[in-house]
Amino acid sequence: MEGLYHQTNKQVHEVQSYMGRLETSDKESVHLVENEIQARIDNIFSNLERLEILSSKEPPSKRQNAKLRVDQLKYDVQHLQTALRNFQHRRYIREQQERQREELLARTFTTNILCWEVPPVQVPRGILL
């Protein structure tokens, strides 16, 4: 259990440092960095599942401390997952705004005169204007 715990803890710290690459990545490689981070987070979650099983098999004197350490790692990884999702959401909004801006710049505008044309009015016979 100790070896897997230390390995997983090290992976959490690596992902934390890897998150800084997201802000400095160019548009072409940001998806690759996101996918790499997500793969690492998924790997950590699978390690945590194994650690939960192993912590429940610890002797009673060590069990509470082992579960507490695993819960702390799980909490840290959930925050990393949330930070990644927030970054992806901000990037998506930014890209959507850029697309809308480009669409507006490419759009040709016309005057509203055509919209204000008055249709001819039929005047009944016998009424003088």
Image (cartoon, helix red, strand yellow):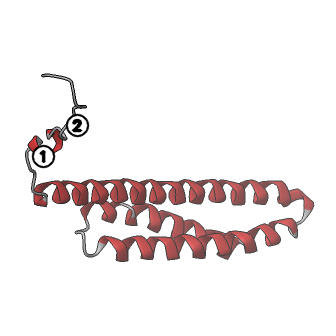
Taking 116 as reference, is 7 left or right?
A: right
Single out the mark in the foreground, 1 or 2: 2
Residue pictured at 43% horizontal, 75% vertical:
35
Residue 49 horizontal/vertical position (percent): 73, 71
Count of marks placed on residues: 2
Numbered circle sitting on residue 122: 2
Res 7 visible? no
Identify the residue at horizontal 17%, vertical 38% (top origin). 118
- Kind of residue sitting beneath label 2: Gln
Describe the element under mark 1 as helix, strand or loop.
helix
- Residue at 59% x, 76% y is 43
Q: Which of 37 and 52 is in front in this view?
A: 37
Q: Which amino acid does label 1 sit on?
A: Leu
Q: Which residue is drawn at 91% across and 60% down?
A: 60
Residue at which label 1 appears: 114
Q: In which quarter of the image is the N terminus?
A: bottom right
Q: Quadrant of the C terminus?
A: top left
Residue 79 image position (x, y, % from top left)? 55, 53
Q: As rendered, which of 4 and 86 lies closer to the eye? A: 86
Q: Tell me where residue 7 sits by quadrant.
A: bottom right
Earlier residue among tags 1 and 2 = 1
Look at the picture and state if 95 lies above or below 3.
above
| Residue situated in front as seen by the camera: 83 or 72 | 83
Asked if residue 121 shows in the view, the reply is yes
